[in-house]
Image (cartoon, helix red, strand yellow):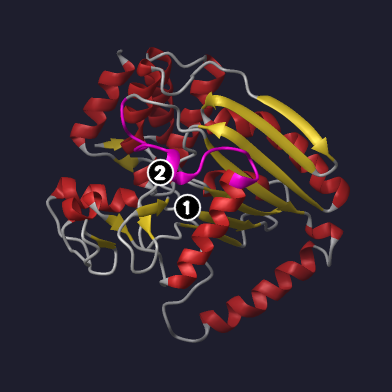
Amino acid sequence: MHISIADIRATAEAALLAHGAGAFQAAEVAKAVARAEETGNIICGLYYLESYCTQLASGRVNGTVEPEVSQPKQGVTRVDAGFGFAQPAFARALAQAVAAAQEVGVATLTVAHAHTCTSLGYFTEQIAAHGMIAIGFTNASAIVAAPGGKTPVLGTNPIAMTVPGPDAPLMHADFSTSAVALGKITMAKAAGEAIPLGWAVNAEGQPTTDPEAALKGALVSAAGPKGWAFGLLVEVMAAGLTGSVNSLDVKGLKLADGKPHDLGQTYLLIDPQGHAGADVMADRLARVADVVASDGGTGRIPGAPRKHLDPVDVPDALWTLVRGLAEG
């Protein structure tokens, strides 16, 4: 079925409201769901909505809590999500964090005690829309083993970065530090498909192409020890700086009930105007982009340009489910 972005957003918002979210909270989460679908990020779009609604109903996520924003130091903005959604917490703190970056040149925005933020790049692109270079970090439930190991220790622990341009981002990247996002494993299982070698190990620590065995085992880091090091950095930035929990202490993100996720996100905001300037920054990136474009390969600057889909092709069964959620 071809569904407009406006209908996706409205129906997702209705579903969240029907399952106990407040008006502001539902609107912010629905906006993120619609944006994910618009940019082709189906793992973080409607595919996640049932989980949001189920966990609202069970109380695993607080859908009405008002985030608490503070500024403990110059250039530091902190928001406590109160075991609620990450999207409304970020929305409440964004303006203050941008103002801090404009004032001091570099600032941080930390979101503590939040539900999974799902698409981390959704937030960095909002920061970049204010003219800031944005780098984001978040952790997730443990699913990645250390190199050569078999015990899940880290989450997929993504990093996102967006470089602003005059009309659209000059660069946008959002990727897990694991070899693959967990959603690709679960989608392969649902489709009855094998996964490539190099994505995961089974419970005995052996490489596997079976998604079910992978889910009972662990994912591996991207680029081996290098990706493992980045995953550890994300754990420090997301759990350590925010005071939220380690990936080890978060049960499956889609489990219907249980303890709140209690995850953290940290964002770095860098004002180009406080350094060499936005024009110089754009020129330096354009220098690289020109060479890449003339090289004849498949390389490109990530996210430039980004695709925007409207309407979106939504599987019939998924849209039927979403409409049912909206009806309560």
Residue reaching furthest bottom? 295
**Res. 303 visible in picture:** no
From mark 2 to mark 1, how far is it between C-alphas?
9 Å
Q: Is residue 246 one of those drawn in magenta?
A: yes
Is 320 on the left-hand or right-hand side of 76?
A: left
Give x and y (percent) for residue 195. 21, 61
Q: Quadrant of the N terminus?
A: top left
Q: Pointer 1: what residue?
A: 157
Which amino acid type is marked by label 1? Asn
Residue in the image at 39% along x and 47% along y: 142
Q: Pointer 2: what residue?
A: 141
Q: Nearer the viewer, residue 164 or 203?
A: 203
Magenta-tinted stretch:
240-256
Instruction: Classify 10 Å Cα crowding around label 1: few (below 14), some (14-19), many (20 and above).
Output: many
Residue in the image at 81% along x and 40% along y: 99
Q: Are marks 2 and 1 in contact (CB under 8 Å)?
A: no
Residue in the image at 85% along x and 42% along y: 74
In the rendered image, the vertical position of residue 104 relative to residue 81, given as above or below: below
Which amino acid type is marked by label 2? Ser
Residue 45 occupies which quadrant of the picture?
top left
Secondary structure state at the residue bearing disc 1: loop
User: Main SS type for the magenta part?
Assistant: loop
**Res. 275 visible in picture:** yes
Q: Quadrant of the C terminus?
A: top left
